[in-house]
Amino acid sequence: MALRAYLDNASTTRVLPEAAAAALAAMGAGPDGPADGAYANPSSVHRWGVAAAAAMDGARRAVAALLGAAPAEIVFTSGGTEGNHLAVLGAARAARRRGRHIVTTAIEHRSILNAVAALEQEGWEVTRLGVGSDGRVSPEAVLAAVRPDTALCAVGHVNNEIGSVQPVARIAEGLGRAGVPLHVDGVQALGKVPTPYTAWGVRFAALSAHKIGGPKGAGALFVARGARIVPPVAGEQESGLRPGTENVPGIAAFGAAARAAAGDDGRLRRLKLRLVEGLRAALPGLEVNGPDPADAEASAPHIVHLSFARAAPGIPAEVLLHAFEAEGVACSAGSACTARRPEPSHVLAALGLPAPRLRGSLRFSLGPSTQAGEIEYAVAALPAAVARLRAETAGSALGR
Amino acid sequence: MEPLLIGRYAEIALKGGNRADFERALARAARRLLPGGSRVELRGSRLLARLPAGLPAEAGLAALRRCFGLVRIEPSWRLPCPADLADITGEAVAAARRAAQAGASSFKIDARRADKTFPLTSPELNRSLGAAVAAATGLRVDVHHPDVAIGVDVRDDAVYVSGAGVPGPGGLPTGSAGRAMALLSGGIDSPVAAYLAAKRGCRLSAAYFHTPPYTGEGTRQKVEDLAAALARYTGDVRLWIVPFTAAQLAVQRAVPEPLRTLVVRRLMVRIAEGLCRRDRAGALVTGDSLGQVASQTLESLAAVGEVADLPLLRPLVGADKVEIVAVARRIGTYDISIRPFDDCCTVFAPQRPRTRPTRLEVRDAEAALGAGAAALVADAVAGSQRLRVTPDGVATDAPTAPGEAGAGEVPAAGAGDVARRG
């Protein structure tokens, strides 16, 4: 079945043409061929190496600009997970003299959960804050959880499953007064919601290229000037924070995608709202898990989590997913990082939703390549697929 | 002195008139499993394998450990005749040293003089070589429970000295028992059942009941990977992808919930039998283990099994889950089976299945499908797609005209004649 509507952009996005072109050029396969030497090692001292380093710095500026940061505050990584690990483990260790307590939330991405759990194994204390039914944590609760021995706070800016937006500006402001560094998982936020992390006083932020139209295997960690990190693996590249020759093609493509991301004007939210309203009109009983999709402050423009539990009673999320897949529509049950685990997602569980509703819920996510035609296709195809499933399973164990 | 691998077989040697067939099947299976360019011959109730120059013995050892029919594989050295006692002693000491490096502290010499012109008898060889090896290596002689038995086989063309061996998988050579059709679900049990049937000499076909959208591509990939894991033992597996959604939904609609699983399984058995005819397979293999779940009580097995004309083999009937898991781990299917993908059995599982149905009530329940049952079976058989899955996991279309068997099969792997005689 051909892919007709790719609505799984929170898992990964199609690489933008300009990003792919940048990567090809950095591999020596650009329009001018290899003669420009763009594939050279950025650590080499010959002119082509110097040019490669300059190209990387161009990408660094483009990514920094999205955060209002200085280029020197951007460390390129292999992606969001590495950034989250580097920040949580490295910043916590750098601040251990202050204490061994971490504040985070119950709905973080697995990479934050795992890093925090690793510290817990080492004897750190962890406060995991709950969220409201809109998937948001209150800044007051974060500040109330801070203790004299709190070394770090780690919060995801936009949740990867339900798209809830955390009040990072207010959290950062309060933590700044308390002198506690804030790490933000900005992977799903970059290019989708404002991310002026420098102005807000955020100290660390993990970013990923492949969520904004860049390739997999490239990402960045924002480390504010003066913020300290003790890297788990010593290296000589990227300010000594990581080892290995830089992924120049991936970084160049990340830079191109970051430049393209600089100007979304509400297009994604309009498309998302059209999707939600179109499906709601055709599928009575369809419910949104998490924040109100129209609430620009609480909900990211590109992610919506829908429950079909009342629109298609008894049909598990995986069956819906495969039925939609048969129509050429890609979406996700949970997040792709956890979709293959049978247990219900910790994020949905934290919203306090009843079990049947969890079992029939899917995530739809948009990205820079999403076209209005894909949304219209999905709005027509999904209700038809649901109707077919309901007819097929009427009176069966599933149709209960 | 030339390195080689000696494979020993036990049960085949007991066969009477069929023995040559079994040995040919064994040699064929060994050739298929060994690296390309290896030479295989049978001599004196031993399988001798020579690897292409430059390949380490381990490569051949790993391959022959998956060769059904072999009970033991021994890295060995061949001394061409004329070999005198000094040559043989030198090789025996070298073999003992290698065993000592691998941790052995005791040994015995297991000499056999087939060439009666050799000046020493077998007991004399044992004593002479035992004393020499003990003196040279410091290893202790232990004729009852040695850490390593060093074999010395004196033949008229050559002397073979073998060191510490490893156990083979046992069983009978692939192809010696014909072809069986295993029902593969993607779970832990069915590939182990298929393995055990294959171990007794069956070539493998497999049927997977694909139920989109209730099962996804991930489950289908999992079954392909399981077939590849089995193919590492048997050679290419013919995997049938059966379109099963229509049949499953028809049962869901027409059959009372507590009996649905049993009626579904009856349809699966009928469809698999239809595929057996297309593949010239002589038996069905399922992963049933008595009493494990509701569909595996004696009553349920009877209600499902009665629709089969061909023998329905249940190699796991006496196995506990821990035993099944142990085999699955050993043969490399466990890690594939536990990948968390949906299978139709869990999606459609009734809340309260009947555990002690009578055959009559299951027949009545199935009668609710009316004349449609035969059509569902026929459509599923006709619509099934046959893949050839290699040990490397490469699945390619292997179409076959209805009634035609063996299309596209590699001649060396064909076992039709042997199967009928065996």
Image (cartoon, rainbow, N blue to C red):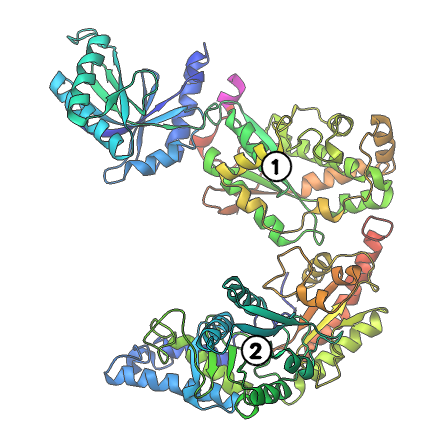
**What are the residue bounds of the magenta stretch?**
B417-422
Q: Which residue is mark 2?
A: A153
Foreground of the two, A243 or A182: A182
Q: Relative to B82, is B413 on the left or the right?
A: right
Q: Is residue B414 left or right of residue A48?
A: right
Amino acid under disc 2: Cys
Q: State the image coordinates of residue B167 (x, y, percent, origin top left).
A: 40, 27
Helix, strand, or loop for circle 2?
A: strand
What percent of the width, then of the height, locates residue B176? Answer: 49, 22
Q: Is residue B18 above or below residue B392?
A: above
Q: To which quarter of the image does residue B47 belong?
A: top left
**Residue A81 at x, y percent in the picture:** 51, 70
Q: Report which residue position mark 1 lands on.
A: B189
Work out which quarter of the rendered image holds the N terminus of chain B and state it: top left
Q: Is residue A124 above or below residue B244?
A: below
Mark 2, other Cα within 10 Å: few <14 / some 14–19 / many ≥20: many
Mark 1: which secondary structure?
A: helix
Q: Chain of mark 1?
A: B
Residue at 71 percent across and 86 percent down: it is A296
Q: Give the class, few, some or many, for how many residues have Cα within 10 Å of label 1's Cα (few <14, many ≥20).
A: many
**Does the rendering let one see residue B133?**
yes
Task: Tell me, yes or no, whether the highlighted magenta stretch contains residue B421.
Answer: yes
